[in-house]
Image (cartoon, grey):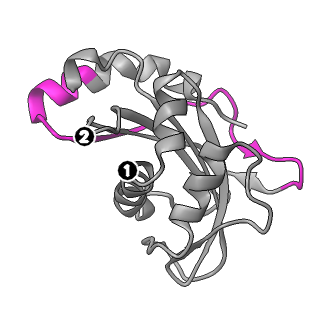
Amino acid sequence: MFGLSAFKGMAMATAAMRARHGASVVVAAAVASSVACSKPDNVQYGDPVGIQIDAKGTVPALEIAVAVTKGRDVTPAVSSLAGSVYAAASSCPAFVTAANGGKAVRLRLTAEAGVLHAPKQAPAEEAGSCMVHALDGKAVTMDKPDKLDVLVEIAALRDAGSRR
């Protein structure tokens, strides 16, 4: 598994990149302590990629970690996932409340033929459940149409006070 703590080392580089480019979405490769991430059913994930999205409306600035099936390229999915996660967060008040309370949400999804699919069993907590249902059926750009396992962790950016 990976956690948003894998992104601590990126904070200064991200701030410098944001100052230079002023982008509302910043993507940075995560330097993870392990080569691959895995989950209990033995799906192997490649290294996570970090995405930061500025606050807008009721949605706080978000820090998103995304990993996909090991051996697959996460890069094509980054932009479409960032937009879909923001749209899902905008439609999930339970997620906004959880994120503002400091809680991260971890989602396991699949994608096939360019479409995200929610798991058969949604997360137990309301925030995660709302997010997977809001992401179900959303388009995602993929490196190839074969089934892709997607692991996403989302939290409010901790030092985002000046980014609202």
For the question of whether residue 72 can be seen, the reply is: yes
Which residue has dot 1 on it?
Answer: 90
Q: Earlier in the sequence, mark 2 or mark 1?
A: 2
Image quarter of residue 18: top left
Residue closest to the eye, 33 or 53: 53
Left or right, 148 with reference to 10: right
Q: Is 71 covered by the magenta stretch?
A: no
Magenta residues? 15-42
Question: Could you tell me the amino acid type at mark 2?
Answer: Gly
Q: Is residue 10 above or below residue 146?
A: above
For the question of whether residue 49 can be seen, the reply is: no
Residue closest to the eye, 38 or 130: 130
SS at badge 1 = helix
Q: Is residue 164 above or below residue 149?
A: above
Image quarter of residue 117: bottom right
Question: Could you tell me the amino acid type at mark 1?
Answer: Ser
Residue at the image point whose x is 56% and y is 28% from the top? 4
Which residue has dot 2 on it?
Answer: 57
Give the x, y percent position of residue 127. Answer: 60, 44
Left or right, 106 with reference to 23: right
Residue at the image point whose x is 40% and y is 56% from the top? 78
Q: Is residue 5 above or below residue 42?
A: above
Residue at the image point whose x is 30% and y is 22% from the top? 13
Q: Residues within 10 Å of mark 1 (few under 14, many from 20)?
A: some
Question: Which of the image's four quarters has the N terminus?
Answer: top right
Residue closest to the eye, 116 or 37: 116
**Contact, CB < 8 Å: mark 2 with mark 1?**
yes
Label 2 and label 1: CA atoms lie apart by 8 Å
